[in-house]
């Protein structure tokens, strides 16, 4: 096992897998969506409020075919894809109360990808910073808050500088992916391939369960200890973000990225039908 940055910089993980220098990685097509069009379908890249529970995430990705589309696209890039998995729900937190979408105007926040695009759309000023730099930026007043998977609020002690935690989760969940060098995969006998595939499914379920249990512990036990105030937005704000931003964002992906890979168009159609089936869009 090697942690992020120990073998190569994160930007070099993809070419290193292609070259079989690294055999397997926990990474994301989100980082290379410029050269891998199906990276736009990765769960961490979707706009807010597409999936609203882990069961919905499993249905969309593992049952309705999004994982299959990503698998096809990555195979053409020399990558064997073992699937999307849950790495914790995406929230954001702040030095001051953020009680509705309207309160985002002027909010200086560290966020990523489509989450930053959402913030900007509603008048905030998002920036991208490495996680270890976020605490000091908030403490010094350069930022008003940040957002990502919930456990970084805990692990980086951001509750010390951001006493307000805003929900519900914009992504349920934020996701990552297991990638394998196709050269290494093809070299495995079928019985070992089956073991790895089965282990990947078990890992996906176990990690999601752990994320959920620890998130509940943070809400129920840690928030009172830290003095964190949880603010949950209502249906009006959720519907506004979904209809004013998320739906047009999905259409924009289909229009701009679809000509590069028809799988992206098909994936957006699956996602929108999924959201209709759950009553999230008309």
Image: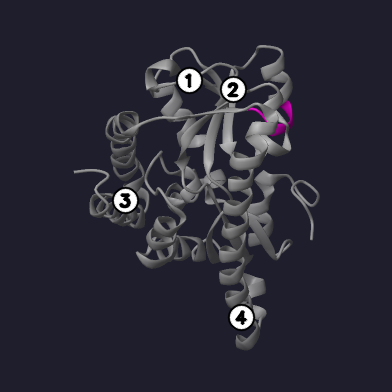
* Distance Cα–Cα, label 2 vs label 3: 31 Å
Asked if the stretch drawn in magenta spans residue 166, the answer is: no
Magenta region: 129-133
Q: Residue 39: x, y in percent?
A: 47, 50
* Category of crowding for the residue at label 2, using alpha-carbon neighbours closer than 10 angstroms: few (below 14), some (14–19), many (at least 20): many
- Observer-nearest residue: 131 or 161? 161
- Observer-nearest residue: 164 or 268? 164
* Distance Cα–Cα, label 4 vs label 1: 48 Å
Residue 55 vertical placement versus 122 (above, below) = below
The residue indicated by pointer 2 is 145
Circles 3 and 4 in contact, beta carbons < 8 Å: no
Quadrant containing the N terminus is bottom right
* Distance Cα–Cα, label 2 vs label 1: 10 Å
Q: Residue 21: x, y in percent?
A: 74, 62
Marks 2, 3: nearer the viewer: 2
Q: Which residue is drawn at 67% across and 18% down?
A: 138
Q: Is mark 1 on a helix, strand or loop?
A: loop
Colour scheme employed for the rendering of this structure: one colour
- Observer-nearest residue: 282 or 82? 282
Residue 75 vs residue 184: left or right?
left
Circles 2 and 3 in contact, beta carbons < 8 Å: no
The residue indicated by pointer 1 is 98
Marks 4, 1: nearer the viewer: 1
The residue indicated by pointer 4 is 193
* Category of crowding for the residue at label 3, using alpha-carbon neighbours closer than 10 angstroms: few (below 14), some (14–19), many (at least 20): many
Label 2 vs 1, first from the N-terminus = 1
* Distance Cα–Cα, label 3 vs label 1: 31 Å
Label 3 vs 1, first from the N-terminus = 1
Circles 2 and 1 in contact, beta carbons < 8 Å: yes
Q: Residue at x 69, y 37 (%)?
A: 154
The residue indicated by pointer 3 is 268
Circles 3 and 1 in contact, beta carbons < 8 Å: no
């Amino acid at each position: 096992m090697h942690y992020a940055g120990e073998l190569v910089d994160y930007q070099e993980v993809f070419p290193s897998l292609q070259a079989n220098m690294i055999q397997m990685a926990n990474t994301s097509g989100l980082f290379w969506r410029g050269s891998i069009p199906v990276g736009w379908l990765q769960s961490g890249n979707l706009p807010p409020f597409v999936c609203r529970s882990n069961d919905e995430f499993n249905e969309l990705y593992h049952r309705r075919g999004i994982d299959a589309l990503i698998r096809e696209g990555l195979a053409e890039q020399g990558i064997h894809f073992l699937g999307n998995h849950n790495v914790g729900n995406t929230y954001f937190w702040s030095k001051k109360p953020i009680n509705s979408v309207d309160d985002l105007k002027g909010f200086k926040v560290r966020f990523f990808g489509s989450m930053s695009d959402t913030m900007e759309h509603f008048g905030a000023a998002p920036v991208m910073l490495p996680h270890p730099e976020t605490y000091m930026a908030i403490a010094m007043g350069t930022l008003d808050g940040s957002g990502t998977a919930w456990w970084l609020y805990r692990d980086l002690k951001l509750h010390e500088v951001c006493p307000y935690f805003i929900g519900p989760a914009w992504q349920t969940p934020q996701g990552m992916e297991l990638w394998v060098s196709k050269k290494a995969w093809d070299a495995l006998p079928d019985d070992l391939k089956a073991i790895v595939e089965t282990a990947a499914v078990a890992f996906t379920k176990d990690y999601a369960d752990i994320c959920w249990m620890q998130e509940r512990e943070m809400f129920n036990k840690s928030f009172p200890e830290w003095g964190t105030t949880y603010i949950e937005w209502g249906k009006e704000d959720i519907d506004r973000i979904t209809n004013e931003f998320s739906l047009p964002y999905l259409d924009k992906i289909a229009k701009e990225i679809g000509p590069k890979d028809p799988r992206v168009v098909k994936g957006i159609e699956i996602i929108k039908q999924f959201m209709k089936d759950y009553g999230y869009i008309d």
